[in-house]
Amino acid sequence: MSKVVSFLSKILNLINLPKHIKNIFLKRKIRKYTANNNDNSNIILKIFNWLIIITVLSSIVYLNLTYKISRGLLIGEVSLGIIICAFLLWKKRKGKKAQTKDPQIKKILLKDQNQNIINTWELRNEVSILIGKKTRINQVDIDLSETIYSSLISRQHGVLNKAGNKWYFEDIGSSNGSGIRRRNDSKKIRLAEGSPYQLYSGDILYIANTKLFVQ
């Protein structure tokens, strides 16, 4: 009888349309959020760079017309403008290289108080992962129902979504909230409900009081 119930629950999970629709909606939300974020940041950076270049060139022209400065000083000012432009381009390329060198996330780890690994969830072939507590009517991908602080974890606590080879976490209305501690940072940040946050290898994700290690 238990095998029949287990088999039926798996079938119901496969045809669980509300869950699949919810995952699709969350993925679209992540993609839209990241695209808007990247576009806005790139536009602001470009405007700022062009303002600096225009200011430097305008200053050179103004000084040349007003004070009729010597050729040597003019050459020096032009050289300074070229150096500033070259620095901005170098900084931009360096930022892109740093992003490409950032290691991709491959798995999520659950550890005990002695830092021994209790469970591992591979992310290699996944695009969307639901975090919470498994029940007969609630199927999750990362089940934390057996953890010490499981009573603080909601049945559907948060979701991990992959967009553009990057992983994002979003709290989906949990009772006790979620947090994150960035790598090389001692501060824990409380996450706003419904907002996606990009994860990096080395981060610690807090599902209520339960730590998940991102690697």
Image (cartoon, helix red, strand yellow):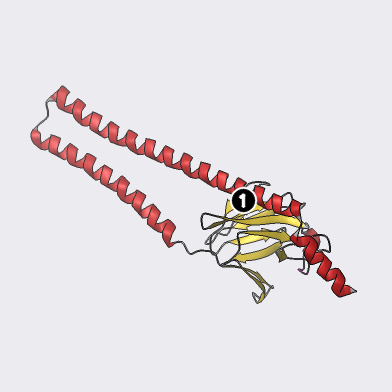
Relative horizontal placement of residue 213, taking residue 67 as reference (left or right): right
Judging by the rendered image, the residue that carries numbered circle 1 is 27
Q: Residue at x 85, y 74 (%)?
A: 3
Magenta segment's dominant SS is: loop
In the rendered image, residue 187, in percent from the top left (x then y), is placed at 59, 56
Q: Residue at x 75, y 51 (%)?
A: 18
Q: Please, which residue is most extreme toward the left here?
A: 71
Look at the picture and state if 24 lies above or below 11: above
The answer to which of 63 and 213 lies nearer the viewer is: 213
Query: What is the quadrant of residue 159 in the picture?
Result: bottom right
Q: Please, which residue is most extreme toward the right here?
A: 1
Residue 157 in the magenta stretch? The answer is no
Q: Which residues are magenta?
A: 144-148
The answer to which of 176 and 198 lies nearer the viewer is: 198
The secondary structure type at the circle numbered 1 is: helix
Q: Residue at x 51, y 44 (%)?
A: 35
Relative horizontal placement of residue 75, taking residue 126 as reference (left or right): left
- The amino acid at mark 1 is Lys
